[in-house]
Amino acid sequence: MTTTSISICNEALSMIGAKTIQSFDDNTENARRCAAIYDSSRRALLRMHPWSFAKRRAQLAPVTTYPAFGYSHAFPLPKDFIRVISAGEYSYEFEERHVLADTNLINLVYVADNDNEQTWDSLFSECMALYLVHKLAKPITGSQTEADSAWQKLQNMLKQARAINGQERPAQDFAADYYPSLMGVRY
């Protein structure tokens, strides 16, 4: 079975004993509720961890208008930007969908708004279904207990998914790239 936004919503609806949907355009309350929360829920869940399946790289060039002060350049973020993994710089800030820095080029590694469910990690799909259950349970069933239970299950599933996702990446040596700015000041 292929994973789609509808199959994930139907999994969530099934978990709370609600009627499934055929599409977001169905003339049903469940379809309207799923359509209203699906995209924002996906973006929120993507922001919670640097998921490997949503990782992207981009080289950013500065825009011609500079920040008024503080940094020499501003770099527009990609349209699908959700969360930074690395900007390739030690000193930078985010402001109004721009990266501010004192460099001519930003090598950005980021989490993208991956809306292609076919490319998602299976554990992320499970997390998405539980996140939807958390949001849908109270309005559909009237049970806050069911929503809270889904939240607890989601927290446990996120821990597992993050651990497995982290094991699939090489270890990072943060200290190797660190040079304190005050090192050597005494001599």
Image (cartoon, grey):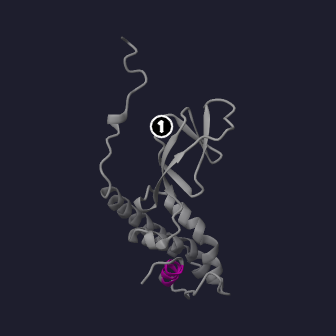
Left or right side of 140 for 158: left
Residue for badge 1: 89
**Amino acid at the residue labelled 1:** Glu
What secondary structure predominates along the stretch shown in magenta? Answer: helix
Residue 121: x and y in percent read 40, 68
Assess disc 1: are there few (<14), some (14-19) or many (≥20) residues with their C-alpha within 10 Å of its C-alpha: few
For the N terminus, give its image quadrant.
bottom left
Residue 78: x and y in percent read 58, 53
Q: Which residue: 48% across, 57% down?
A: 48
Classify 125 as above or below 105: below
Q: Which residue: 52% across, 75% down?
A: 133
Q: Which residue: 65% across, 83% down?
A: 25
Left or right side of 167 for 146: right
User: 124 or 142: nearer the eye?
Assistant: 124
Question: Is residue 10 rendered magenta in the image?
Answer: yes
Residue 152: x and y in percent read 44, 67
For the C terminus, give its image quadrant.
top left
Mark 1 element type: loop
User: 154 or 77: nearer the eye?
Assistant: 77
Quadrant hosting residue 52: bottom left
Q: Which residue: 55% across, 86% down?
A: 18
- For the magenta stretch, what is the residue range? 6-14
